[in-house]
């Protein structure tokens, strides 16, 4: 496609959905304790609060509690559904960021969460990646069976013309191949993972006290990422269990203009649910099938934006401990996790507010990078800490 042939992005169909309460998928069943453990496993988060029943029984919760990141598992579509509205032919999407506001109620087995959704706003910009690109934001509010708001997520979707992104990638070059790690490098990475895990496991049930400005959190390494790890992540999302959800209300997400190769086969799904699975066939297949990754402008298989957000929330919550609470997080994603790469999360305390009626609140600057130092995500979060 020559530069002159790049289509303009017609957003008239998108405009029809702005400010309109949306439908979408909801869950049939209550949350089970195994859903929480499967999530911790898929997010590579060995915090025993979320799967070890004996340890959790001795905690302030008295039982297994879902991590705050689990909230994004309490909806269908990772919270991106309200940000993918309106038909634009030949487009695909990537996650551009998540902002979270958490209200206070925690999630436990036996809870049943429903979602309320709305497209918030959008803007079209020119990008080097794909030319005309839409950055659309949509809100998902998570409400439990008692009518309590668990939290709200404002998800940013990057919608772009897939063919143009693939053309601009110009063959992908060396990026098509996974980097090679030596045995020594892999051993060192595993050592660093264990050091990170001990940083919160050693806290056990104690309070995180004496936090000060300038404090650097322990680095969290993740990876190297593989098709197997991406698949494990995908299968930890409860929405992917056959028969787990139902659709209600109006939503155009499934008719957003996906390429034919990335669309769900709704009729075929009535015979074989794998046809609407998303990973085997559908918009998520590029995450684990390189040929479809390249079709949408990615050099090789890549991870999920929602999982990147979960990694960050887990990182903050693990540091805060069971007596702490992430009250707000605003993260922008600038690059996905690719197979063969490793991810590192770092944060620094930039402020501590001691006048809050809820107890001390720490503000943290967060950055997620690859092994080469390339930024994958960055932003700011506020974490409520326990009083002495």
Image: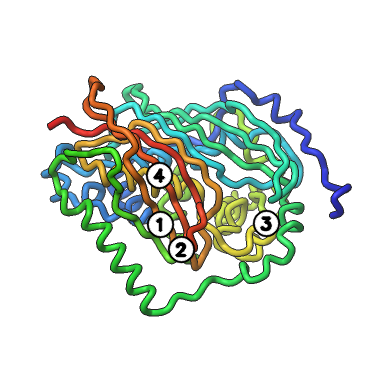
- As drawn, the label of residue 206 is none
Question: Which circle's residue, 3 or 1, is located before the other in the chain?
Answer: 3
Q: What element carries label 2?
A: loop
Q: Name the residue under label 3.
A: 297
Callout 4 environment at 10 Å: few (<14), some (14 to 19), or many (20+)? many
Q: Name the residue under label 4.
A: 366
Q: Which residue is painted at 33% across and 55% down in the image?
A: 219
CA distance for labels 4 and 3: 27 Å
Question: Which circle's residue, 2 or 4, is located before the other in the chain?
Answer: 4
Question: Which circle's residue, 4 or 3, is located before the other in the chain?
Answer: 3
Question: Which circle's residue, 2 or 3, is located before the other in the chain?
Answer: 3
Q: Which residue is painted at 60% across and 21% down in the image?
A: 19
Q: Name the residue under label 2.
A: 371
- As drawn, the label of residue 344 is 1
Q: Which residue is painted at 43% across and 58% down in the image?
A: 343
Return the x and y of residue 146 as percentages of the image width and height: 31, 23
Q: Quadrant of residue 157?
A: top right
Residue farthest toward the bottom in the current orientation of the protein: 183
Question: Which circle's residue, 4 or 1, is located before the other in the chain?
Answer: 1
Query: Residues at badges 2 and 4 in contact (C-beta under 8 Å)?
Result: no
**With 12 as the anchor, is 315 left or right in this view?**
left
Q: Quadrant of residue 23?
A: top right
Question: Which circle's residue, 2 or 1, is located before the other in the chain?
Answer: 1
> Which one is in front, 195 or 19?
195
CA distance for labels 4 and 1: 11 Å
Q: In which quarter of the image is residue 207?
A: top left
């Amino acid at each position: 496609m020559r530069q002159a042939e790049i289509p303009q992005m017609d957003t008239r169909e998108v405009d029809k959905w702005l400010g309109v309460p949306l439908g979408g998928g909801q869950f049939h069943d209550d949350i089970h304790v195994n859903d929480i453990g499967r999530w911790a496993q898929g997010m590579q988060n060995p915090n025993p609060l979320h799967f070890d029943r004996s340890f959790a029984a001795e905690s302030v919760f008295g039982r297994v509690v879902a991590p705050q990141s689990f909230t994004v598992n309490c909806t269908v579509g990772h919270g991106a559904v309200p940000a993918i509205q309106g038909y634009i032919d030949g487009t695909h999407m990537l996650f551009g960021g998540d902002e979270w506001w958490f209200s206070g109620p925690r999630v436990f087995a036996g809870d049943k969460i429903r979602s309320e959704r709305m497209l918030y706003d959008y803007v079209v910009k020119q990008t080097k990646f794909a030319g005309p690109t839409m950055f659309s934001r949509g809100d998902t509010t998570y409400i439990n069976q008692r009518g309590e708001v668990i939290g709200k997520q404002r998800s940013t979707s990057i919608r772009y013309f897939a063919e143009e992104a693939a053309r601009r990638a110009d063959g992908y070059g060396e990026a098509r191949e996974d980097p090679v790690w030596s045995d020594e490098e892999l051993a060192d990475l595993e050592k660093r993972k264990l050091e990170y895990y001990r940083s919160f496991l050693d806290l056990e049930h104690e309070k995180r006290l004496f936090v000060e400005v300038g404090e650097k959190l322990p680095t969290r390494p993740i990876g190297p990422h593989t098709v197997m790890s991406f698949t494990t992540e995908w299968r930890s999302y409860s929405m992917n269990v056959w028969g787990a959800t139902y659709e209600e209300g109006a939503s155009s997400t499934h008719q957003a203009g996906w390429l034919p190769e990335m669309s769900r086969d709704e009729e075929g799904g009535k015979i074989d649910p794998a046809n609407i699975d998303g990973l085997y066939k559908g918009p998520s297949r590029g995450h684990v099938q390189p040929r479809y990754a390249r079709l949408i402008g990615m050099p090789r298989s890549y991870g999920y934006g929602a999982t990147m957000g979960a990694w960050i929330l887990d990182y903050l919550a693990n540091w805060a401990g069971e007596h702490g609470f992430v009250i707000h997080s605003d993260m922008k994603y600038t690059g996905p996790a690719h197979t063969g790469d490793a991810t590192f999360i770092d944060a620094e305390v930039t402020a501590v507010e001691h006048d809050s009626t809820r107890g001390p609140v720490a503000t943290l600057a967060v950055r997620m990078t690859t092994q080469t130092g390339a930024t994958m995500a960055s932003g700011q979060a506020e974490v409520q800490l326990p009083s002495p």
